[in-house]
Image (spheres, helix red, strand yellow):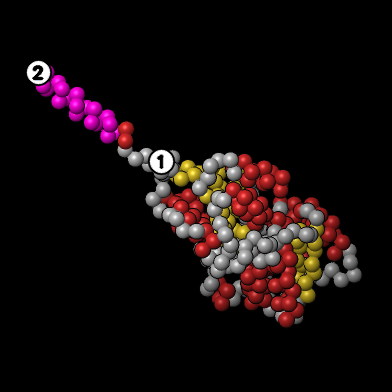
Amino acid sequence: MKHHVTLGLLAALIFIAGCGTSEKQDVRRVGIVNGIPILSILEASFKARMTEHGYVEGQTIDYIARGAFDGREQEIQVVSDLMREDLDLLVSMPTEVSLIAREKTREMGIPLVFSNAFVEGTGLIESIRAPGKGITGVRFPGPDLVLLRLETLLKIRPDVRRVIVPYLDGYPIVAAQLDALRPAASRAGVALIEMPVPDGPAVQPALDALLASASPDVDAILLITDPISVDPDAIAALEAFATTCRIPFAGIFPDATPHTLFSLMIDLDQMGRLTADLAHRILQGEPAGSLPVLSADAVLGVNLQAAALLGITVPESVLSHADTIIH
């Protein structure tokens, strides 16, 4: 009897010892800082793709996600707070918060993967192929998109000659888009009526001044990617102006207004997945700076309701390339 008890006790001790010395599962800590609410789509696709890579939230990976929607001071504070979270990696989106994150992560030696960020003219990276120590990401191809918007507008309305371009004055990502747009418009014989404004509410008085001017005739509104293109006050004023003048938008989202004739935007779902692919490679040991910057595909949306209101027939050459068509 004593022999059996001893053997049982020994077996239990071996079992307990084995449990106590088993290797603890490594849990990765990934910070996420998001500066624009709409990019929650991107954030969700990032996490979904990380799950496909085998990470299980709460078991093999923890996400410390923070929103920073109230301007630069909050962005600085949120990124600084995340630097105290013992992170293996930080994901930042879009440009402005990524610029802050680059400086903070560089100081702390934390790899950074940016997403939906401009790289042209911002100093965020050194180059596409070699982005710099500790950083890589998925760029937002703003200059490419604005050229595609102009090209698509002229395919639909070849007679367009005067185009309103509203934008937030002094905003960092605007200059590179205008630098691309101005010569392209000039070559196409299109005059840009640039409308720099300090904020969204300032769009209405700027449009009123244009209507009161000696030559208010315009053929279209072309939005570049900046805060004005998603500002509710700005969009409401531009919609009213487009309705009065019966002119189309070349915009960001195809259903933004009844007069948004078409949109060209980046596939945010694909962007999130590409961001996760880079994050996975870094967590597996590849240096961030050795991974070239990636780009997501553009998505074309066409609003045939807006076309009907404006008496426009959208050519098949445009429709055949549309990812979304609103009938």
The answer to if 2 sits in the magenta stretch is yes
**Residue 249, numbered circle:** none
250 vs 278, left or right, is right
Measuring from the top left, give residue 152's x and y in whole percent: 63, 73
Q: Name the residue carrying label 1.
A: 59
Q: Check if mark 1's residue and mark 2's residue have beta carbons within 8 Å.
A: no
* Near-viewer residue (174 or 288): 288
Quick one: SS at disc 2? loop
* Near-viewer residue (176 or 306): 176
For label 1, the crowd category at 10 Å Cα-Cα, with few meaning under 14, some 14 to 19 and many 20 or more, is: few
- Is residue 99 in view from this perspective? yes
Q: State the predominant SS element of the stretch in magenta.
A: helix
Using the rendered view, name the quadrant where residue 49 is placed: bottom left
Measuring from the top left, give residue 118's x and y in whole percent: 64, 62
For label 2, the crowd category at 10 Å Cα-Cα, with few meaning under 14, some 14 to 19 and many 20 or more, is: few
Q: Amino acid at mark 2?
A: Met
Instruction: Give the residue at x 72% y 45%.
Output: 73
Measuring from the top left, give residue 149's x and y in whole percent: 65, 70
Instruction: Give the residue at x 41% y 43%.
Output: 26
301 vs 190, left or right, is left
Quick one: SS at disc 1? loop
Magenta region: which residues? 1-19
Which of the two marks, 1 or 2, is nearer to us in this view? 2
The answer to if 57 sits in the magenta stretch is no
Q: Where does the C terminus fall, quadrant-wise?
A: bottom right
Q: Is residue 250 above or below residue 89?
A: below
Q: Name the residue carrying label 2.
A: 1
Using the rendered view, name the quadrant where residue 25 is placed: top left
- Is residue 149 in view from this perspective? no
- Measured in 3D between alpha carbons, the distance from the residue under mark 1 to the one under mark 2, in whole angstroms, is 44 Å
1 vs 150, left or right, is left
* Near-viewer residue (291 or 314): 291
